[in-house]
């Protein structure tokens, strides 16, 4: 526990100024007594990603988080990719072991751990995912790993929903739909969980929400919005008004951070410190 050794960490993204990671990790390092661990945000445009990855080795950074728009492209520049990140095709955490860079995707861990904390069992469930982007991919893989009985993807672009579903046909019963179609409306009537992975409702567009009629859901279905700013999106507020259990994106954010911290340091972070730090930053925004 604790050390005065110097180690450097950071996050690569574009833009990256909004990221909560620097403060979250710094607070956790400090609480653990890692007094000389530094965490720096790097705003890196797409064309400079390769050089940035080389710099992780050149400057001997121990670890690097990765965010939009680099999560997919970076997979081509690393020495090894963990099996979850390989299936998802995206990396959010890079660990440098003496010049050997390994990519991980801790969003899967964060998502599944958040379900555990909420006492939701994905095994044998019917899960509905709204959106078909990067986060949807990680969540879909998590649900396949846990053997969800059926997974329905609804998106504004039905082709993207179907392509994503086809990519995972070997791993589970997955089908993609236009979220405005009658067949999608029929599907959601047996959902055990609905997960919003689109940015609809995220600050500053807090009056937006995905076009889903929550009244069609069965009683007790969990409405999960992976957005964490605001903590109660319009989707979550509507679900609460209708009496559904809800979950926002803060626990997933926190738990993916916990797993990345463990990969970086081999230790468990102080989760209370990390949670309080995130809550403080978000309530000030
Ligand atoms: P992404 O790869 O860009 O995917 C976004 C998805 O949302 C796509 O399917 C996109 O559809 C759809 N979408 C975007 N704008 C839309 C709109 N106006 N109307 C309808 N659909 C729209 O982004 P991502 O990385 O998956 O992230 C998505 C959200 O998840 C963000 O809000 C992010 O902050 C959040 N997130 C949270 C966590 C957490 O730990 N809590 C982790 C990861 C991500 P098209 O393909 O048609 O554009």
Image: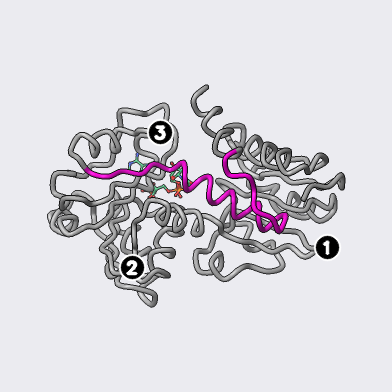
| Structural distance between the alpha carbons of marks 1 and 3 | 39 Å
| Structural distance between the alpha carbons of marks 1 and 2 | 39 Å
**Sequence order check, earlier mark of 3 and 2:** 2
**Sequence order check, earlier mark of 1 and 3:** 1
Q: Can residue 72 be seen here?
A: yes
Give the residue drawn at x 20%, y 34%.
241
* Most frequent secondary structure within the magenta stretch: helix
Residue span colored magenta: 244-272
**137 and 254: which is toward the camera:** 254
**Which is closer to the viewer, label 1 or label 3?**
3
Give the residue drawn at x 46%, y 59%.
138
Give the labeled residue for mark 1: 98
Secondary structure beneath disc 2? loop
Give the labeled residue for mark 3: 231
Secondary structure beneath disc 1? loop
**Sequence order check, earlier mark of 1 and 2:** 1
Q: Is residue 18 above or below residue 102?
A: above
Give the residue drawn at x 43%, y 63%.
142
11 left or right, relative to 85: right
Give the residue drawn at x 55%, y 46%.
68
For residue 167: magenta?
Answer: no
93 left or right, relative to 61: left
Label 2: how many residues lie within 10 Å, few (<14), some (14-19) or many (20+)?
some
Residue 271 x, y percent position in the rendering:
58, 44
For residue 252: magenta?
Answer: yes
- Give me the disc on residue 58: none
Label 1: how many residues lie within 10 Å, few (<14), some (14-19) or many (20+)?
few
- Give me the disc on residue 123: 2
Q: Is residue 250 above or below residue 104?
A: above
């Amino acid at each position: 526990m604790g050390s005065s050794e110097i180690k450097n960490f950071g996050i690569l993204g574009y833009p990256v100024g909004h990221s909560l990671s620097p403060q979250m990790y710094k607070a956790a390092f400090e609480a653990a007594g890692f007094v000389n661990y530094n965490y720096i945000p790097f705003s890196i445009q797409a064309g400079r990603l390769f050089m940035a990855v080389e710099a992780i080795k050149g400057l001997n950074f121990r670890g690097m988080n990765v965010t939009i728009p680099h999560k997919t492209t970076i997979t081509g520049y690393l020495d090894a990719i963990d099996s979850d990140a390989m299936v998802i095709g995206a990396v959010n955490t890079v660990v440098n072991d003496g010049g050997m860079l390994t990519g991980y995707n801790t969003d899967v861990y964060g998502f599944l751990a958040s379900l555990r904390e909420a006492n939701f069992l994905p095994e044998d469930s019917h899960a509905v995912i709204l959106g078909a982007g990067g986060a949807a991919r990680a969540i879909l893989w998590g649900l396949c790993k846990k053997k969800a009985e059926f997974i329905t993807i609804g998106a504004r672009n039905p082709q993207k929903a179907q392509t994503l579903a086809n990519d995972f046909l070997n791993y589970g019963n997955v089908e993609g739909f236009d979220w405005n179609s009658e067949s999608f409306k029929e599907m959601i009537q047996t959902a055990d969980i609905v997960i919003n992975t689109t940015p609809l409702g995220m600050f500053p567009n807090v009056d937006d929400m995905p076009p889903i009629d929550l009244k069609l859901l069965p009683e007790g279905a969990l409405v999960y919005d992976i957005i964490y700013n605001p903590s109660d999106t319009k989707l979550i507020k509507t679900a609460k008004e209708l009496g559904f259990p809800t979950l926002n994106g803060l626990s997933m954010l926190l738990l993916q951070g916990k797993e990345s911290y463990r990969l970086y340091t081999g230790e468990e972070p102080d989760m209370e410190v990390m949670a309080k730090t995130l809550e403080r930053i978000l309530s000030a925004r």
